[in-house]
Image (tube, rainbow, N blue to C red):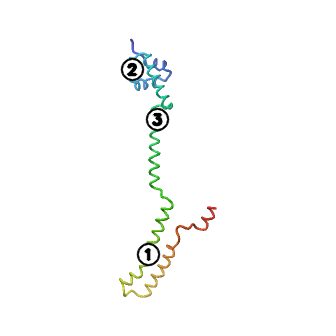
Amino acid sequence: MPKLKIKDVAAHLGVEPQSAGRLLRELNLTTADSLDRIRLSYIARLRAEAGNNGQSPERERLLTARRKLLEAELRKRMRQSIDVDEAQRILVGGAQSCRTRLDTVDRRLRANFPALPEDVLQFIRREHTEALAMVAIDVGEPEEDEKEVAR
């Protein structure tokens, strides 16, 4: 039996010549096989793809790759996000730690530097009072503007 030409295989299967060559490779066939064998293998492949929700193996691989990429992106974003209650707990804890630390600075200065002039200590106390007022803001309470927006 003479060897077939790719254009004859393409015409018989109703595909482009480039696709016919690719199909023969994917079906593990050559132009030395008969047109009947090539056609039957091609039909079997089409049926298998149809049973696979009509998706070709290439399409299925593409969808799987996209799904894995989206899942990886979601996992990355979930690690970067934080629950609102957790954020509030962290902020309040940080504010309390800062307040505690600032509360004791003037006493520690007095203990470590007994000769420190009183006017310097008064200045430090004033600065601490302002800093403590800023830290004392209740992190959990929304501002009035935010309450209006929420309504």
Type of the residue with mark 1: Thr
Type of the residue with mark 2: Thr
Q: Position of residue 63 (x, y in %)?
A: 47, 38
| Residue 143 vertical position relative to residue 53 in the rendered view, above or below | below
Q: Which residue position is annotated with label 2?
A: 30
Q: Which residue position is annotated with label 1?
A: 100
Calculate the distance from the C-alpha at mark 2 to the C-alpha at mark 1: 82 Å
Type of the residue with mark 3: Glu
User: Residue 130, labelled with which disc?
Assistant: none
In primary-sequence order, the first of circles 2 and 3 is 2
Calculate the distance from the C-alpha at mark 2 to the C-alpha at mark 3: 26 Å
Residue furthest toward the top? 1
Q: Position of residue 51 (x, y in %)?
A: 49, 29
| Residue 23 vertical position relative to residue 133 in the rendered view, above or below | above
Residue drawn at x 46%, y 37% is 62
**Dot 2: element:** loop
